[in-house]
Amino acid sequence: MAHAAPQAGSATSGTEAVLAPESRDVLLRRQVAQVALAQVRKQDPAWHPDQRDCAGLIRFAVRTAYKRIAPARLETPLWTDARGTPTDFADAETLVRRNLVLLGRDDATRESLRTGDVLAFLHEHDAGPVFHLMLVVRPEDRAHAPARVVYHPGEKGAQVRTGLLHNLADEAPREWRPVPSNNAFVGYFRLKEWMP
């Protein structure tokens, strides 16, 4: 892992250094994976119960990763609201429409996903359309461990769940399959600030 030398006068501790962008990216993604998977075992008390839903899981995992790896990034809000104003809160629809970039909807895109990427679904309900998000966790050693999705089903008090990404296409109920023939599948996304 490459580290840039701390700059003179920079506020770094003995163990913290200014990271090269590629190192920071890897470390942030690794932390997102650890935080998200930890919620499957036991939801962190720091994740406020009122924000425990699919978008809340993504916000919590990303915010916690930045807090651990690049805390200075949190001096400004991570998200943008529907008006384009920086904010600390963004619901699933706002994440998709304002904070994520569509990567695609096909198998090739699925194979190129990285930890921290997002699957988005849009389901029509009597009360109107509802977005649902799942977070991708893909081990750096792809040959020995498959990609997973981690998600909160949205119901108050529900547990965070996980499953294999490739199983969704064949084994999930039709409305949850990330395949082009499923009109509820919006696509695979990545955080705008994580784009090259």
Image (spheres, rainbow, N blue to C red):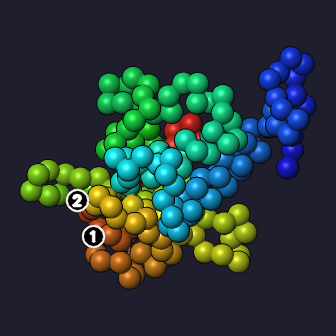
**Amino acid, disc 2:** His
Q: Is 180 situated left or right of 47 in this image?
A: left
Mark 2 crowdedness (10 Å alpha carbons): few <14, some 14-19, many ≥20: some
Q: Residue furthest front?
A: 45
N-terminal-most mark, 1 or 2:
2
**Amino acid, disc 1:** Glu
**What residue is shown with label 1?**
175
Taking 21 as reference, is 9 above or below it?
above
Quadrant position of residue 105: bottom left
**Which label number is shown at residue 123?**
2
Q: Residue furthest top?
A: 9
Can residue 174 be spotted in the picture?
yes
x then y, percent, for residue 99: 44, 38
Can residue 102 be spotted in the picture?
no
x then y, percent, for residue 22: 75, 43
In the rendered image, the quadrant that contains the C terminus is top right
